[in-house]
Image (cartoon, rainbow, N blue to C red):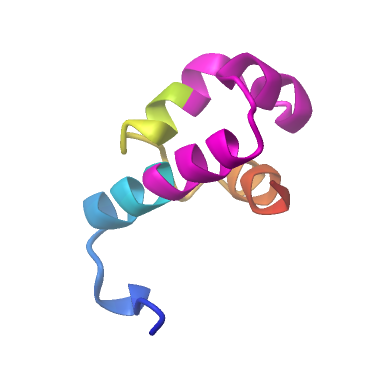
Amino acid sequence: MEKRFDFFTVPELSIELGTRLRQQRLLKSLSQEALSIQSGLGISTIQRFEQGKGEIGRASCRERVSTF
């Protein structure tokens, strides 16, 4: 069963995004540095996302992360 995100608060979405990003990064055996190079995002941005502190509203980050 899929999760429904329309009932999530912004902090809950940030945590979910970070969890999924980290899971996918590890499944592909990528370091944060390697993901940074592939996505064009800074390492600190990836770290913030994985800690649930990312800014979901930034379109450029969303586009880059969605391709991952």
**Which residue is depicted at the point 48% across and 16% down?**
44
Above or below: residue 36 compared with residue 25: above
The x and y percentages for residue 68 are: 69, 46
User: In the figure, is residue 16 to the left or right of 21?
Assistant: left
Q: Whole-percent x and y of residue 42?
A: 60, 18
Residue at 48% over, 43% down: 23
Q: Does the stretch in magenta take in 64?
A: no
In the image as oriented, which residue stretches furthest toward the right?
Answer: 38
Number of numbered tags placed on the structure image: 0
Q: Which residues are magenta?
A: 19-46
Quadrant showing the N terminus: bottom left
Q: Quadrant of residue 40?
A: top right
Residue 11 percent location from the top left of the image: 23, 50
Q: Is 20 drawn above or below residue 51 in the view shown?
A: below
Height in image: 6 above or below 26? below
20 inside magenta stretch: yes
Please tell me which residue lies in front, 55 or 5.
Answer: 5
Query: Residue at left 40%, top 33%?
Result: 50
Horizontal side of residue 44 vs 62, given as left or right: left
Q: Find the residue positioned furthest to the bottom.
A: 1
Q: Main secondary structure of the magenta part?
A: helix
Q: Looking at the image, which residue is at 66% across and 22% down?
A: 36
In the foreground, 54 or 16:
16
Percent position of residue 37, x then y: 74, 20
Q: Is residue 64 left or right of residue 43?
A: right
